[in-house]
Image (cartoon, rainbow, N blue to C red):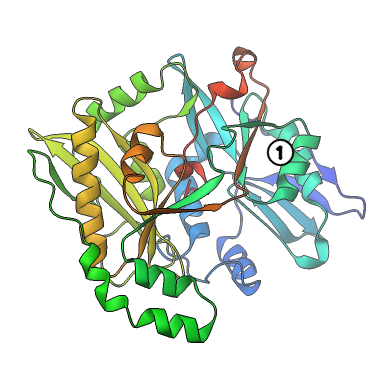
Amino acid sequence: MSKTNNTYHEFYTENGLRVIPIDDYPIDYVLKMVSDGGFLPSSSHPSENTLASVVDYQQRTNNYGFSKAIGMYCDEVLSGIMFLPVFKTRYNNTSYYCVQTAAIYIYPQYRGVFKTMVQCLLANYRQTLKLFMFSAPQVHKTGEKFGFFEVCQHVFAYNRYRILAPFSFISSSINTPILKKLVGLFCIFDGLFTPPLYRDETEVFENPHFDGDYTAIEKDYYITYGEKLVPEWNREVLLAKYGAACHSMSKQCSYNSTFHIVACRQNIICGSMVLKAIPGFRRLVIVEWHATENKRNQTLKAMLCFVTRKAATLKYEALMFKGLGADYEGILNRGFVMKKKSPHRVFVSNDIEALNKLSQHDYTFFYSSDDINF
């Protein structure tokens, strides 16, 4: 795996703005720039700001030696930034670096320079995979113009909601005040939909500090996806991505609150689920879910029962999911599920010779690979 060198290729937009890779960015300035634009909250804590979680991830991993972002400068003042956290992928027992565009922010008066940032990305991050995982059609179009190709087609085409509290869910989805108030009268009946306990030998509990040994899941993960290119997965990856934002589930949750659930059987961790709070709603999104092959169906049922019952006591309305894999979504789809079309698509650029023969069907990414949130 080769890393970038210290010779940076500079680019200039049509109106002379300078675009270059940057190893370190002024964190406080960037957070203020983004929050002033209404893009994210102003907090610098990862549990309250998704951008802060990107910063934390890059600090924990040193971004694997790569420049952390691409900056756009006007008169030497940072006026636009593309965050580029790097993570490892694996194919045929060999690791490869993947550079992900986690977030992009450009001052409104400088719109139109995104294509120059993409040129800079391609020129400076050689021998890597480059990944766009966005819902923005303009990003998709620009990526295609520069040779990015779509993978995981249709995998993220719908946001699916497993409904926990149907009346509350419908009420929060209605914009008409009279109808919202009318449906709200029935919210007292939501408790009738709490699922019964699922009883077997599986022990399920919250694990916000990621304690324990995850190697059993890790081994099965690579067996399951042995013929695919997938993000590397282990305890260290979990800590780097979610450690700073993770805490116990409670009624008080922040903008980027993260929760972690594990399943154990005979004191061996056999299941791991990461959830995030959806800002502005009493809803959770399952960003990743993995379990060992041995008794997987029982493990998934036990974990889902724990999460739904816990979420119901905390007045959450629904669990959102997409792109988790057939086994996992099959369990979730057995409940009361609604779906909403999503423009979420995944595009990859590859200049690694060893991966040139991969087809679009040979890549597997998960919803958690979006935004570190990833």
Q: Residue at x 74, y 61 (%)?
A: 79
Q: Residue at x 50, y 34 (%)?
A: 365
**Residue type at tag 1:** Leu
Task: Pick the quarter of the image with the N terminus.
Answer: top right
Nearer the observer, 344 or 132: 344
Give the x, y percent position of residue 200.
Answer: 8, 40
Q: Left or right of 366: which side holds 15? A: right
Res. 206 in view: no
Q: Left or right of 323: which side holds 73? A: right
Indicate the quadrant where residue 281 lies: bottom left
Q: Secondary structure at mark 1?
A: helix
The mark total stands at 1
Q: Residue at x 25, y 28 (%)?
A: 292
Give the x, y percent position of residue 369.
Answer: 49, 41
Circle 1: is it few (<14), some (14-19), or many (20+) Cα within 10 Å?
Answer: many
Nearer the observer, 77 or 171: 171
Give the x, y percent position of residue 207.
Answer: 21, 50
Residue ID for mark 1: 121
359 versus 269 height, above or below: above
Nearer the observer, 204 or 127: 204
Give the x, y percent position of residue 75.
Answer: 83, 61
Nearer the observer, 167 or 225: 167
Indicate the quadrant where residue 217 lies: top left
Res. 71 in view: yes
